[in-house]
Image (tube, rainbow, N blue to C red):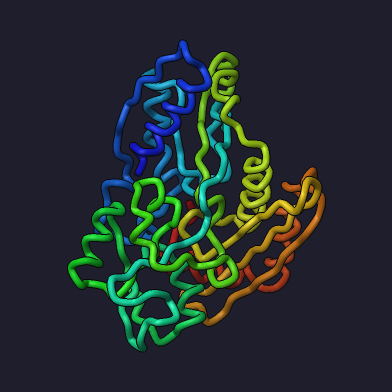
Amino acid sequence: MALWQAEFVKAELEKAHPHLTVELLPMSTKGDKILDVPLAKIGGKGLFTKELEDRMMAGEADIAVHSMKDVPMELPEGFALGAILQRHTPTDAFVSNKYRSFAELPQGAILGTSSLRRKAQLMAIRPDLDVRDLRGNVGTRLGKLDAGEYDAIVLATSGLQRLGLDARIRHEITPEDCLPAVTQGTLGIEYFAADEEIKTIISVLNHRPTEIRTLAERAMNHRLEGGCQVPIGVFAELLGNQQIKIRGLVASLDGSQIIRNQVIGPQSQAYALGRVLGDALLEQGAKAILDEVYAGDHNKG
């Protein structure tokens, strides 16, 4: 998936700048390599980003392409986000060889997911299911499903679409049933903040509507001091040209307790509104839930 993202950005940059040649420096991060442990237990800030930043610091790369949901709320000193690309489909996808939708799963069915956020929200709807951890790249996860280890699995819709695997999606889970992860489906480009030339080159890929939504969602998550692997969901939508609606939630690991709220306001106040939503969730008891999650070794990211 990381390679697809890099190839996609390379193609977009070369399309925008016909005389530019972009060279890829493929590499795997700690989060890509450790596949036998749930992501939440690996934890740590910058699980998918720090090693890329190290290569940039070593002078081997000018930019790094990230899935925004993996980017920590605060970047290391000297780094900045120079472009937020247009968001791909932000929802979660239900994938199964036996059942057409999440609602069709029989009692006790085995459901695979790597996400505490998905697990909590889906267990809130179906506490009767046997939800098990599922790691690996998309191909590995689909292989485990095809081998009969799971009755169904849940993956990011955007990931399947990017890899041309739309046909595997049996049902797209709506935000009403499962709020996406912070900035799910969004790519960002990181660069050295002092490099004005690089900033100019990559800024043409910035998609302002997505940037506004990203700002709002990350602001809520920042206020909650949430990492990329905790049961926090958020989804910002632009209402016309002026307003933004932000829905957020914090859930206990088993989905038995879910705190929800939403705010609507001017797009120009996206960041402040995200903070307001975070405050509202904290006032409703979100801190106690998150403290319990972190106490169980689910580290902030």
**Which residue is at 35% across, 20% downward?**
23
**Which residue is at 66% across, 55% downward?**
236
**Which residue is at 51% across, 26% downward?**
191
Would you place residue 253 above or below residue 163 in this image?
below
Q: Residue 202: name its quadrant.
A: top right
Q: Residue 155: name its quadrant.
A: bottom left
Would you place residue 150 above or below residue 38 in this image?
below
Work out whether residue 208 or residue 37 is closer to the camera in this orientation and state it.
208
Q: Position of residue 143 (x, y in %)?
A: 22, 60
Q: Position of residue 216 (x, y in %)?
A: 68, 49
**Which residue is at 69% across, 58% downward?**
246
Query: Relative to 167, is 211 on the left or the right?
Result: right
Would you place residue 128 above or below residue 193 in this image?
below
State the count of labels: 0
The quadrant the N terminus occupies is top left
Query: Relative to 237, is 11 on the left or the right?
Result: left
Q: Position of residue 273 (x, y in %)?
A: 76, 53
Would you place residue 251 above or below residue 10 in this image?
below
Work out whether residue 38 or residue 200 is closer to the camera in this orientation and state it.
200
Query: Relative to 186, is 157 on the left or the right?
Result: left
Q: Position of residue 218 (x, y in %)?
A: 62, 49
Outermost residue, top side: 19
Outermost residue, left side: 147
